[in-house]
Amino acid sequence: MTKPLVLIVEDETPLVTLLRYNLEKEGFLVCEAGDGEEALLQIAERKPDLVLLDWMLPLVSGIEVCRRIRRSPETRSLPVIILTARGEENDRVRGLDSGADDYVVKPFSPSELVARLRAVMRRAQPSNAQDVLRFGDIEVDTAAHRVTRAGKPVHLGPTEFRLLQYFVLHPGRVFARGQLLDAVWGHDVYVEGRTVDVHIRRLRKALNAGGAVDVVRTVRSAGYALDHATR
């Protein structure tokens, strides 16, 4: 089995050494970039399976690198974890809004980081249980990791793809944030409930591009559901 390749984008050499040691010990291959420009080159050339991305970088910031990853058709499904000393809620939301799949605050436990990394990579892998799922004019191709609505492509990050896949498998059912966290993020990783709201907002924005009817229903004090809208 091929070992997954993780790109570490970090300009603090001691931290890179620590990360490399722990990731290689857990069976990952590792490559490095010390600034945002080098990161983008490495992503194009090495095609890593996941990017561990520091927020504060020389030349091009981690947030901007993440945005560029999500804008490119070749890399928009690439899992990204932002690693940063910024721990305020607004910073976490900003990091997720840039397209990151997860957000780890320094200082961190190496074992927790590895658990989060594995969880994000699991979520990025499509299920083979059923290749094409449908809900109204939405099609989810789990094998090709593609989504279309009314025949037009819908561009989603890995976490939004998993959310939509789960919703389409359970149409009309209302899920609380905790249920979605367990189903999409997994039981072994702690993620805040607010994270669900951020990803739901991104999913809704992508599905409703071009003025399409909103099929993601918010149920006050209960959660979210994929439902045929009535407007």
Image: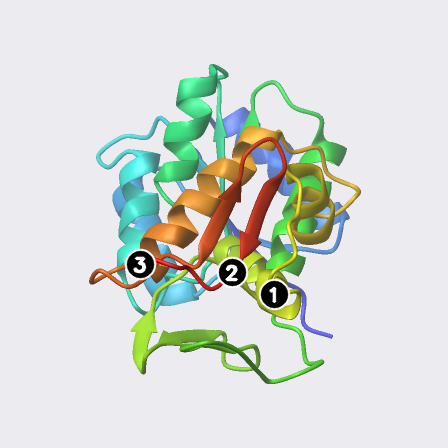
- Residue 72 visible, this angle: yes
- Location of residue 200 in the rendering, given as x and y in whole percent from the top left corner: 47, 46
Q: Is residue 224 left or right of residue 154?
A: right
Please name the residue shown 73% across and 38% down the image: 189
Q: Which mark is residue 143?
A: none
The amino acid type found where label 2 is placed reads Asp
Please name the residue shown 59% across and 34% down the image: 17
Mark 3 or 1, nearer chain start: 1
* Mark 1 Cα-neighbour bin, 10 Å: few <14, some 14–19, many ≥20: some
Spatial CA distance of label 3 from label 1 is 17 Å
Secondary structure state at the residue bearing disc 1? loop
* Mark 3 Cα-neighbour bin, 10 Å: few <14, some 14–19, many ≥20: some
State the image quarter where residue 198 is shown: top left
Please name the residue shown 53% across and 53% down the image: 159
Q: Residue beneath label 3, please?
A: 208
The amino acid type found where label 3 is placed reads Asn
- Residue 101 visible, this angle: no
State the image quarter where residue 132 is shown: bottom right
For the residue pair 134 and 75, the one nearer the viewer reads as 134
Q: Residue beneath label 1, please?
A: 171
Q: Are marks 2 and 1 in contact (CB under 8 Å)?
A: yes
Looking at the image, is mark 2 or mark 3 nearer the viewer? 2
Mark 2 or 1, nearer chain start: 1
Q: Residue furthest front?
A: 230
Q: Residue beneath label 2, please?
A: 227
- Location of residue 66 in the rendering, given as x and y in whole percent from the top left corner: 35, 45
Q: How is the image coloured?
A: rainbow
39 lies above or below 14: below
Q: Is residue 212 left or right of residue 101?
A: left
The amino acid type found where label 1 is placed reads Pro
67 lies above or below 109: below
Spatial CA distance of label 2 from label 3 is 13 Å
